[in-house]
Image: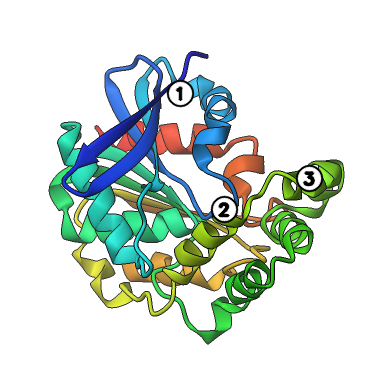
Amino acid sequence: MKTQINTVTKGDIAMRYCRFGQGDGVFVIIPGISLKSVMDSASAVANQYSDMAEKYTIYMFDRRENIPDTYTIRDMARDTAAVMKELGLEKVNLFGASQGGMISLVITIEYPELVGSLILGSTAARIWDGNRNVIDSWISMAEAHRTEELCMSFGEKVYPSFFFEQYRDAFAGLARMVTDEDLDRFITIARGCEGFDVLADAGKIQCPALVLGAADDAVLGPGGSEEIMAALEGRSGCESYMYDGYGHAAFDTAPDYRARIMDFIAASRK
């Protein structure tokens, strides 16, 4: 599938994004933390979401290019909202995975005019001692330039064992492509999770929301999704589902994930 990679500039923000699909609806993806830019995987993402491409024009946003030394989740959300506005995107179907879900929560709470429906995958509304251990360990590995150990830990924690074992060599190979600049960027973005907490504001979400968690989430644990589910429980247009056996990256590994999202969006539009 043809994938366009562009850069949008707004003030001091320069952010890369890819665009594919030709549908009337707009679906925006904000991915989680990655060791290399998500734009390096744009074609793979386009193929993964090919079943949505007829109904939606799909955008996937990276973090800004010129990230500051300190870059919080709220900063990331502010920047992403700014470039969405610059592109004329509003009332979109917003899907955030992992850290991208945290960013999506802030956008939905603080810029409600941009979001028509919200889909959250394997994320959390707050970071506390119980769900920060894995991220902290990744930061330590990156600071020590233990790149192969970091790549292998990333694969083992994010993906279920059957997937990790199948692609073990690929994760080892990734370590040879990760540069010192990539590590520095990873550290800054990962540190952005520190102190994040919008759980008390989750009740401000007015649009339909779908929370998709993973019972075997080895990165943030299932508790993050469960807290959001509890905060939205009983709200009209809000749904939830917990996967089991597909790991933190159920959004990549569960075969019915996108069908579940499309069914939710269709129902929310009725």
| Screen quadrant of the C terminus | top left
* Residue to which mark 3 is pinned: 163
Which element is circle 1 on?
helix
Give the mark nearest the N terminus, 2 or 3. 3
Residue plotted at (32% across, 48% down)? 118
Residue plotted at (84% across, 47% down)? 168
Residue type at the position of mark 3:
Phe
- Camera-nearest residue between 80 and 54: 80
**Mark 2 or 1: the one toward you:** 2
Residue plotted at (52% across, 25% down)? 46
Cα distance, mark 1 to mark 3?
Answer: 24 Å
Q: Is residue 100 left or right of residue 170?
A: left
* Residue to which mark 2 is pinned: 182
- Residue 52: give its label: 1
Q: Is residue 70 left or right of residue 110?
A: right
Residue that lies at the very extreme toward the front in this rendered image: 180
**Residue contact at pointers 1 and 3, CB within 8 angstroms:** no
